[in-house]
Amino acid sequence: MFLIGWNGILPRTSISGHPLSHTALTWVSALLTNCAQKHLCSGAVPSHSPKRLLAIRIAEDGQIKVKLVEPEKLSAPYIALSHCWGTERSCMTTRETLADNKQDIPWNSIPKTHQDAIKFSLKLNIKYIWIDSICIVQDDEADWEIESSKMADVYQHSYLTLAATSSSGDSKGCYPDIEGPSYESEIDVPEGATGISKVFIRRPLKHWNNLPATMVAQEFPLLSRGWVFQEKLISPRILHFCSTELVWECHELSVCECGGFGANDISREQYLTIRTCENTNVSRMDTPYISPYGRN
Ligand SMILES: [Zn+2]
Ligand SMILES: [Zn+2]
């Protein structure tokens, strides 16, 4: 039984542990540069500007400032957010709040998912973000009809779509505030007569391309939402915030931090074999992935 589990071992890279870490931001920046320069996905400057965007900046006192703007022409890239609203209905733009939101949107009134997307955008040095609930006047029927009909354009011309893929609602956030415990353990492996090598092991991460549909809905709630298919198809680039790692998808490349998402991933049958081993209480050591690269 032990040997059956070891058949599932594949080499994988270490994961960053948190989207705001230097490692994660370097990884995303490299993918953005590579995509913008070498792919046919799209350029950085939009040829179409949404009617409204959130202008975001860090003030001199270090506080993040957010306000609604209506740019006539935009010469800077913007990010679009793909998210599950959940049951909460906070921080929406209405006819009553439109004027106030153009002055300033208090940081504390902004749901965590939006806050996380804004913080991540600023780390990428992007100064504009489009969020449907704030950029469309929710109780103005005419505005909603016009702007919601243009949502395809919004996603198509975004520099990057940030997807809160593992979040079931706006209060849940895109990622935890602080890095959680490491998913990897360190072990010593004898090498030769006297040598010792260090390897890092972890359980396989979950990816939606090799999970049963019920588990996809549980692990990646956003992917169950109808609109997301349009947003995924139309966006030139998507960065998914998943519970354990980041996943990048553009028209020419799909890749995740651990390297398990894509053509070389384990098959659903292999995954199910491994799960079966776990369910029979075989040693935890029977299902690790070994990273030969160590921690990043
Ligand atoms: Zn690309
Ligand atoms: Zn992965």
Image (tube, grey):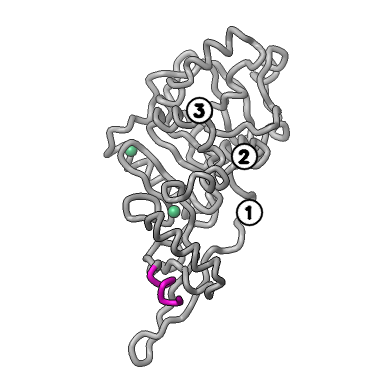
Rendering coords of residue 206 (x, y %)? 49, 54
Residue ID at (42%, 47%): 209
> Badge 2 local density, few (<14 within 10 Å), some, or many (20+)?
many
Disc 2, SS = loop
Q: Are discs 3 and 2 less than 8 Å apart at CB?
A: no
Question: In percent of the image, x 54 and y 42: which residue is there?
Answer: 217
Most foreground residue, 53 or 161 = 161
Q: Does any atom of ligand 1 lie closer than 8 Å to the CB of label 3? A: no
List the residue tagged with mark 2: 168
Q: CA distance from mark 3 to mark 2?
A: 14 Å
Residue 265 in view in this figure? yes
User: Could you tell which of marks 1 and 2 lies nearer the N-terminus?
Assistant: 2
**Residue type marked 2:** Ser
Cα–Cα gap, marks 1 and 2: 19 Å
The residue stretch that appears in magenta: 1-7
Identify which amino acid the numbered label 1 is placed on.
Answer: Ile
- The residue sitting at 54% across, 63% down in the picture is 183
Circle 1 is placed at which residue position?
A: 178
Residue 18 or residue 72, whichever sits in front: 18
Q: Quadrant of residue 192?
A: bottom left
What secondary structure do most residues of the magenta stretch adopt?
A: helix
